[in-house]
Image: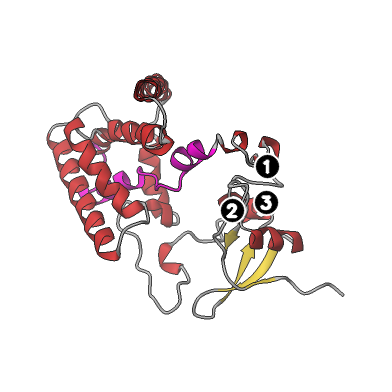
Amino acid sequence: MSEPLHTVTTLPAARQPGCPFDPPAELLDARRHGPISRYTHPGGKPGWLITGYDLVRSVLADSRFSSRRELLNVGDFEVPPPPPGEFLLMDEPQHGRYRKPLVGKFTVRRMRLLTERIEQITADCLDAMEKAGPPTDLVTAFAKPIPTIIICELLGVPYQDRGSFQEQIDAFMGGETSEEELTAAYTATQEYLAELVVAKRANPTDDVLSELTDSDLTDEELRGISLICWPPDSTPPRTCCPSAPSPCCGTRCSWPRCGPTPHSSTGPWRSCCVI
Protein backbone atom coordinates (compact mmCIF):
# COMPACT_ATOMS: atom_id res chain seq x y z
CA MET A 1 0.00 0.00 0.00
CA SER A 2 1.47 3.33 -1.06
CA GLU A 3 1.96 6.16 1.43
CA PRO A 4 -0.41 9.15 1.25
CA LEU A 5 0.87 12.20 -0.58
CA HIS A 6 2.57 14.92 1.43
CA THR A 7 0.43 18.03 2.05
CA VAL A 8 1.66 21.64 1.96
CA THR A 9 -0.67 24.12 3.64
CA THR A 10 1.01 27.41 2.68
CA LEU A 11 3.51 28.57 0.06
CA PRO A 12 6.60 29.71 2.00
CA ALA A 13 8.82 32.53 0.80
CA ALA A 14 11.35 33.05 3.60
CA ARG A 15 14.84 31.75 2.79
CA GLN A 16 17.05 29.95 5.27
CA PRO A 17 19.72 32.05 6.99
CA GLY A 18 23.28 31.41 5.84
CA CYS A 19 22.69 30.58 2.18
CA PRO A 20 20.54 32.89 0.02
CA PHE A 21 20.65 30.40 -2.85
CA ASP A 22 18.62 27.69 -1.08
CA PRO A 23 14.82 27.46 -1.41
CA PRO A 24 12.72 27.88 1.77
CA ALA A 25 12.99 24.99 4.23
CA GLU A 26 9.34 23.96 3.68
CA LEU A 27 9.93 23.46 -0.05
CA LEU A 28 13.03 21.39 0.63
CA ASP A 29 10.97 19.28 3.05
CA ALA A 30 8.23 18.81 0.45
CA ARG A 31 10.82 17.71 -2.11
CA ARG A 32 12.16 15.11 0.30
CA HIS A 33 8.68 13.58 0.52
CA GLY A 34 8.46 13.22 -3.26
CA PRO A 35 8.14 15.24 -6.45
CA ILE A 36 4.50 16.20 -5.86
CA SER A 37 2.46 17.34 -2.84
CA ARG A 38 -1.14 18.27 -2.22
CA TYR A 39 -1.89 21.97 -1.87
CA THR A 40 -5.13 23.85 -1.24
CA HIS A 41 -5.46 27.14 -3.09
CA PRO A 42 -6.91 30.25 -1.42
CA GLY A 43 -10.64 29.78 -1.49
CA GLY A 44 -10.44 26.04 -0.91
CA LYS A 45 -9.83 24.71 -4.42
CA PRO A 46 -7.55 21.63 -4.36
CA GLY A 47 -4.29 21.74 -6.29
CA TRP A 48 -0.76 20.40 -6.45
CA LEU A 49 2.71 21.63 -5.54
CA ILE A 50 5.38 20.08 -7.76
CA THR A 51 8.95 20.12 -6.45
CA GLY A 52 10.67 17.42 -8.52
CA TYR A 53 12.97 18.82 -11.20
CA ASP A 54 11.99 16.39 -13.96
CA LEU A 55 8.29 16.65 -13.22
CA VAL A 56 8.43 20.46 -13.20
CA ARG A 57 10.07 20.43 -16.63
CA SER A 58 7.41 18.04 -17.92
CA VAL A 59 4.54 20.19 -16.64
CA LEU A 60 5.98 23.44 -17.99
CA ALA A 61 6.46 21.85 -21.42
CA ASP A 62 2.99 20.25 -21.53
CA SER A 63 0.41 22.28 -23.45
CA ARG A 64 -2.39 20.68 -21.44
CA PHE A 65 -1.40 22.97 -18.58
CA SER A 66 -2.49 26.56 -19.10
CA SER A 67 -0.63 29.84 -18.60
CA ARG A 68 -3.79 31.96 -18.81
CA ARG A 69 -3.90 34.57 -16.08
CA GLU A 70 -7.69 34.45 -15.76
CA LEU A 71 -7.44 30.83 -14.59
CA LEU A 72 -5.30 31.66 -11.54
CA ASN A 73 -6.67 30.50 -8.20
CA VAL A 74 -6.73 33.52 -5.88
CA GLY A 75 -9.75 32.84 -3.71
CA ASP A 76 -12.96 34.69 -4.50
CA PHE A 77 -11.23 37.34 -6.60
CA GLU A 78 -11.91 37.04 -10.33
CA VAL A 79 -8.68 37.60 -12.24
CA PRO A 80 -9.16 39.38 -15.59
CA PRO A 81 -7.35 38.28 -18.77
CA PRO A 82 -4.06 40.07 -19.47
CA PRO A 83 -4.16 43.19 -21.65
CA PRO A 84 -3.45 42.77 -25.38
CA GLY A 85 0.21 42.07 -26.10
CA GLU A 86 1.16 40.84 -22.60
CA PHE A 87 1.59 37.30 -23.87
CA LEU A 88 3.47 35.65 -21.00
CA LEU A 89 0.16 34.77 -19.36
CA MET A 90 -1.59 33.58 -22.52
CA ASP A 91 -1.94 30.24 -24.33
CA GLU A 92 -1.76 29.54 -28.02
CA PRO A 93 -2.76 30.88 -30.47
CA GLN A 94 -2.65 34.31 -28.80
CA HIS A 95 0.77 33.65 -27.25
CA GLY A 96 2.34 32.75 -30.60
CA ARG A 97 0.78 35.69 -32.43
CA TYR A 98 2.61 38.12 -30.14
CA ARG A 99 5.78 36.15 -29.51
CA LYS A 100 6.71 35.21 -33.08
CA PRO A 101 7.13 38.72 -34.50
CA LEU A 102 9.16 39.73 -31.44
CA VAL A 103 11.48 36.72 -31.65
CA GLY A 104 12.02 37.43 -35.34
CA LYS A 105 13.58 40.78 -34.49
CA PHE A 106 16.38 39.21 -32.46
CA THR A 107 18.55 38.22 -35.40
CA VAL A 108 22.12 36.90 -35.20
CA ARG A 109 23.40 40.25 -36.44
CA ARG A 110 21.50 42.21 -33.81
CA MET A 111 22.61 39.86 -31.04
CA ARG A 112 26.26 40.24 -32.08
CA LEU A 113 25.91 44.00 -31.99
CA LEU A 114 24.14 43.71 -28.66
CA THR A 115 27.00 41.64 -27.24
CA GLU A 116 29.49 44.37 -28.05
CA ARG A 117 27.18 47.00 -26.57
CA ILE A 118 26.64 45.02 -23.35
CA GLU A 119 30.41 44.63 -22.95
CA GLN A 120 30.82 48.39 -23.33
CA ILE A 121 28.02 49.20 -20.85
CA THR A 122 29.44 46.70 -18.37
CA ALA A 123 32.91 48.20 -18.69
CA ASP A 124 31.47 51.69 -18.18
CA CYS A 125 29.69 50.56 -15.00
CA LEU A 126 32.84 48.93 -13.65
CA ASP A 127 34.88 52.06 -14.42
CA ALA A 128 32.31 54.21 -12.64
CA MET A 129 32.39 51.91 -9.60
CA GLU A 130 36.18 52.06 -9.48
CA LYS A 131 36.15 55.84 -9.79
CA ALA A 132 33.53 56.22 -7.02
CA GLY A 133 35.46 53.94 -4.66
CA PRO A 134 34.10 51.80 -1.82
CA PRO A 135 31.57 51.11 -0.51
CA THR A 136 29.50 50.20 -3.58
CA ASP A 137 25.88 49.12 -3.87
CA LEU A 138 26.00 46.40 -6.55
CA VAL A 139 22.29 46.77 -7.33
CA THR A 140 22.28 50.49 -8.11
CA ALA A 141 25.79 50.64 -9.58
CA PHE A 142 25.94 47.42 -11.59
CA ALA A 143 23.04 44.93 -11.63
CA LYS A 144 20.30 47.46 -12.30
CA PRO A 145 21.68 49.89 -14.90
CA ILE A 146 22.98 47.24 -17.33
CA PRO A 147 19.63 45.60 -18.22
CA THR A 148 17.89 48.97 -17.99
CA ILE A 149 20.13 50.61 -20.59
CA ILE A 150 19.95 47.60 -22.92
CA ILE A 151 16.15 47.35 -22.84
CA CYS A 152 15.78 51.10 -23.32
CA GLU A 153 18.01 50.93 -26.38
CA LEU A 154 16.17 47.90 -27.77
CA LEU A 155 12.82 49.71 -27.45
CA GLY A 156 14.23 53.03 -28.60
CA VAL A 157 13.44 54.95 -25.39
CA PRO A 158 15.02 58.41 -25.81
CA TYR A 159 17.96 59.05 -23.52
CA GLN A 160 16.31 62.03 -21.83
CA ASP A 161 13.28 59.91 -20.83
CA ARG A 162 15.13 56.94 -19.35
CA GLY A 163 15.54 58.19 -15.80
CA SER A 164 11.87 59.02 -15.18
CA PHE A 165 10.71 55.97 -17.12
CA GLN A 166 12.88 53.66 -15.02
CA GLU A 167 11.51 55.20 -11.81
CA GLN A 168 7.98 54.29 -12.88
CA ILE A 169 9.02 50.77 -13.85
CA ASP A 170 10.73 50.28 -10.48
CA ALA A 171 7.69 51.58 -8.61
CA PHE A 172 5.25 48.99 -9.92
CA MET A 173 7.65 46.08 -10.39
CA GLY A 174 9.76 46.48 -7.26
CA GLY A 175 7.08 45.31 -4.83
CA GLU A 176 7.89 47.97 -2.22
CA THR A 177 5.18 50.57 -2.90
CA SER A 178 1.64 51.08 -1.65
CA GLU A 179 -1.35 50.00 -3.72
CA GLU A 180 -2.04 53.61 -4.70
CA GLU A 181 1.57 54.24 -5.74
CA LEU A 182 1.69 50.97 -7.68
CA THR A 183 -1.48 51.85 -9.60
CA ALA A 184 -0.22 55.33 -10.39
CA ALA A 185 3.16 54.05 -11.58
CA TYR A 186 1.57 51.34 -13.73
CA THR A 187 -0.78 53.87 -15.32
CA ALA A 188 2.09 56.29 -15.99
CA THR A 189 4.16 53.50 -17.57
CA GLN A 190 1.29 52.43 -19.81
CA GLU A 191 0.71 56.01 -20.88
CA TYR A 192 4.38 56.54 -21.69
CA LEU A 193 4.60 53.31 -23.71
CA ALA A 194 1.46 54.28 -25.64
CA GLU A 195 3.09 57.63 -26.52
CA LEU A 196 6.31 55.83 -27.48
CA VAL A 197 4.46 53.50 -29.88
CA VAL A 198 2.77 56.48 -31.57
CA ALA A 199 6.14 58.24 -31.87
CA LYS A 200 7.78 55.16 -33.43
CA ARG A 201 4.98 54.84 -35.99
CA ALA A 202 5.42 58.47 -36.98
CA ASN A 203 9.23 58.52 -36.93
CA PRO A 204 10.78 55.02 -36.91
CA THR A 205 14.33 54.62 -35.62
CA ASP A 206 16.77 51.70 -35.47
CA ASP A 207 15.15 49.69 -32.68
CA VAL A 208 12.87 46.69 -32.15
CA LEU A 209 9.73 48.67 -31.38
CA SER A 210 10.04 50.71 -34.59
CA GLU A 211 10.36 47.51 -36.62
CA LEU A 212 7.28 46.02 -34.95
CA THR A 213 5.18 49.02 -35.99
CA ASP A 214 5.45 47.68 -39.54
CA SER A 215 3.45 44.56 -38.54
CA ASP A 216 -0.31 44.04 -38.17
CA LEU A 217 -0.11 44.61 -34.41
CA THR A 218 -2.24 47.43 -33.00
CA ASP A 219 -0.89 50.25 -30.85
CA GLU A 220 -2.43 48.64 -27.76
CA GLU A 221 -0.79 45.30 -28.56
CA LEU A 222 2.60 46.94 -29.13
CA ARG A 223 2.29 48.71 -25.80
CA GLY A 224 1.70 45.36 -24.08
CA ILE A 225 4.64 43.70 -25.84
CA SER A 226 6.89 46.60 -24.83
CA LEU A 227 5.91 46.14 -21.21
CA ILE A 228 6.74 42.41 -21.39
CA CYS A 229 10.31 43.32 -22.35
CA TRP A 230 10.86 44.78 -18.88
CA PRO A 231 11.96 42.18 -16.31
CA PRO A 232 10.80 42.56 -12.75
CA ASP A 233 13.31 43.22 -9.96
CA SER A 234 13.30 39.52 -9.00
CA THR A 235 14.99 38.43 -12.23
CA PRO A 236 18.63 37.25 -12.32
CA PRO A 237 20.35 40.42 -13.62
CA ARG A 238 19.18 42.40 -10.60
CA THR A 239 19.25 39.78 -7.86
CA CYS A 240 21.74 37.04 -8.74
CA CYS A 241 24.53 39.49 -9.60
CA PRO A 242 24.50 41.16 -6.17
CA SER A 243 24.14 37.76 -4.46
CA ALA A 244 26.99 36.13 -6.36
CA PRO A 245 29.81 37.32 -4.07
CA SER A 246 28.11 35.90 -0.96
CA PRO A 247 29.87 32.48 -1.06
CA CYS A 248 33.12 34.38 -0.70
CA CYS A 249 31.87 36.57 2.13
CA GLY A 250 31.40 34.32 5.12
CA THR A 251 28.44 32.10 4.25
CA ARG A 252 28.87 28.37 4.56
CA CYS A 253 27.41 27.45 1.19
CA SER A 254 29.58 26.55 -1.79
CA TRP A 255 29.29 27.06 -5.54
CA PRO A 256 28.62 23.40 -6.46
CA ARG A 257 25.85 23.16 -3.88
CA CYS A 258 24.25 26.37 -5.07
CA GLY A 259 24.46 25.66 -8.79
CA PRO A 260 21.32 25.15 -10.93
CA THR A 261 21.34 21.35 -11.11
CA PRO A 262 18.46 18.85 -11.05
CA HIS A 263 19.10 18.36 -7.33
CA SER A 264 19.60 21.93 -6.18
CA SER A 265 18.60 25.27 -7.58
CA THR A 266 19.37 28.95 -7.38
CA GLY A 267 15.84 29.55 -6.21
CA PRO A 268 12.40 27.96 -5.88
CA TRP A 269 11.42 29.19 -9.34
CA ARG A 270 13.72 26.54 -10.79
CA SER A 271 12.39 23.68 -8.69
CA CYS A 272 8.68 24.09 -7.99
CA CYS A 273 5.42 25.12 -9.57
CA VAL A 274 1.80 25.17 -8.44
CA ILE A 275 -1.15 23.84 -10.42
Query: Mark 1 or mark 3, which is nearer to you?
Result: 1
For residue 174: magenta?
Answer: no
Q: Is residue 214 left or right of residue 11?
A: left
Q: CA distance from mark 2 to mark 1?
A: 20 Å
Q: Amino acid at mark 1?
A: Arg
Residue 55 position by quadrant: bottom right
Q: Which mark is residue 201?
A: none
What kind of element bears circle 2?
helix
Residue farthest front in this picture: 134
Upstream in the sequence, badge 2 or badge 3?
A: 3
Q: Can residue 37 be seen?
A: yes
Residue 40 appears at what percent x and percent y? Answer: 58, 75
What kind of element bears circle 3?
helix
Residue 97 appears at what percent x and percent y? Answer: 37, 48
Upstream in the sequence, badge 2 or badge 1?
A: 1
Disc 2: which residue: 268
Q: Which mark is residue 252?
A: 1
Disc 3: which residue: 53
Coloring basis for residues: secondary structure
Query: Mark 2 or mark 1, which is nearer to you?
Result: 1
Q: Amino acid at mark 2?
A: Pro
Q: CA distance from mark 1 to mark 3?
A: 24 Å
Residue 150 appears at what percent x and percent y? Answer: 34, 31
Residue shown at 19% from the left, 42% from the top:
197
Looking at the rendering, the stretch of residues picked out in magenta corresponds to 214-243
How packed mark 2 is, by other alpha carbons closer than 10 Å (few <14, some 14-19, many 20 or more), is some
How packed mark 3 is, by other alpha carbons closer than 10 Å (few <14, some 14-19, many 20 or more), is some
Residue farthest right in this picture: 1
Instruction: Report the magenta stretch's main SS.
Output: helix
**Whether residue 158 is situated above or below residue 82 in the rendered picture:** above
Q: Quadrant of the N terminus?
A: bottom right
Residue shown at 36% from the left, 39% from the top:
102
